Image (tube, grey):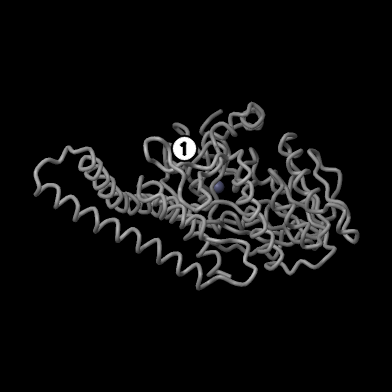
Amino acid sequence: VSMTDPCHLCTRPLSDALTVWEQGRTGPLHTAACLRCGLVQTVPHPTEAEVSAYYESGEYRQEFRPLPVFELGEDLEAVRNEDGSPRYVDPTDERYGTMLDRAGMHTAKRLVATHGLGAGAKVMEIGCGDGRVAAAMVWHDLEVHALERDPRKAVEAEGHMENAWCGNRPATPRPTVDTVATRDGFDFVYALQVIEHFADPIAGLRDNVVRYAKVGGIVHVEVPTVERPYVSLSHFFQKPHVVNYSSDTLGEAMVLAGLTDVRVWIEGSVLVGVGVRAAEAPPAPEWPEPWSRAHQTVAYLHDWERRRLEREKGMAQAAAMHDLMSRLEAGQLTSPEEQIAAGKEWARFRDTATDAVMGLQALCHALDEPGDDWDADPYIRGFLMGGIARQQDFALVCHHIINHLIMRLNR
Ligand SMILES: [Zn+2]
């Protein structure tokens, strides 16, 4: 391994690549932007063997667990631990699965609507994971096939897809999940949060995604983007993400992988790329001098981080407030003046935070459509009932809801 690896996108040696960040979610990680094309990538490149070992050893699943969700009781009150903090739903719990089902249905509906997929279309999901999106695609009377390299996940996916098909859809061929591809020629191929994991991103996109589409078939990919890092940079950059695309670099990667009529856009914090499989390799993109993308990207990301830290100061104030209230409750604030001042501060903060969340809820309801698969209420109720126990919970729930709102507004 060396810093002279060629850029994944334009093949320029990365010896003079601009350092973007040195920290990843689970440890030190050197991320750099290619001076010519601006592609943000892990340098030195992880090898195919390293990437395979990472997933096969179970290390990936260990390091990247499901997103936390509040546990709500019968009365929609947050269930609490002994120390009073709200309890999260165990990801193995059935109720957690129900939420994931709804998210899968929402995604499938979006894919079908975006591309006008008609009944009987042959679709393929690459890297389907637990198969919830693929299962929801079955409900749209599509002929659904999926590929999942992890045999345990493939079994799980098969269960979900079989349940959706269930023999009740005689006009629709039985869905399948394979760990190794046996078919191609699909009308529609999609890969959600997958292609940034390939050790060789361009070849991976061409050989593991595009090749399954028929000539003229549509390919749809979704990836995180350096244009909207949804968290701190040290959390955004992560070992399993070999590359971090922007609208420009994703579009170029798709052309290099054999797609034409490429369109790229951002929904919430997700970068979406759509293209049509070409009969012949389209002309390769060029990056004429002067090159400025790498510098622009680094400047943008550092500014993003600076603004995020400013927001974080506000969050730190909230944490200090919580600390103050804990001391009040524990009887550590003894003078009446101290107690009254603390009480006033707390009430002001609690009202502001509650107003913010109630506002989000009202906005969600205003945008609700009949038959919508996604419902903000469980998150919002979970938060309101749980109170402001930790400022991270507040940020997490708001972030989740706001992303959904943005995606909905984009449509
Ligand atoms: Zn490059």
In-image side of 118 versus 101 (left or right)? right
Image position, residue 200 (x, y; %): 65, 40
Toward the viewer: 127 or 319? Answer: 319
Q: Is residue 15 above or below residue 378?
A: above
Location of the N terminus (image quadrant): top right
Q: Is residue 172 above or below residue 338?
A: below
In-image side of 51 versus 159 (left or right)? left
**Which residue is at the far right?**
170
In-image side of 277 versus 4 (left or right)? right
| Figure quadrant of residue 20 | top left
Regarding residue 34, the answer to whether it shows in the image is no
Q: Is residue 111 above or below residue 70?
A: below
Please, what secondary structure does the residue beneath circle 1 have? loop
Around disc 1, counting alpha carbons within 10 Å, would you say few (fewer than 14), some (14 to 19), or many (20 or more)? some
Q: What residue does disc 1 label?
A: 25
Q: Is residue 362 above or below residue 132?
A: below
Residue drawn where x is 40% and y is 67% of the image: 359
Image position, residue 28 (x, y; %): 44, 32
Toward the viewer: 113 or 214? Answer: 113
Residue drawn where x is 67% and y is 61% of the image: 274
Image position, residue 372 (x, y; %): 62, 66
Image position, residue 165 (x, y; %): 82, 53
Regarding residue 171, the answer to whether it shows in the image is yes
Q: Amino acid at mark 1?
A: Arg
| Figure quadrant of residue 262 | bottom right
Toward the viewer: 195 or 262? Answer: 195
Toward the viewer: 128 or 388? Answer: 388
Location of the C terminus (image quadrant): bottom right
Residue drawn where x is 14% and y is 52% of the image: 341
Residue drawn where x is 86% and y is 43% of the image: 182
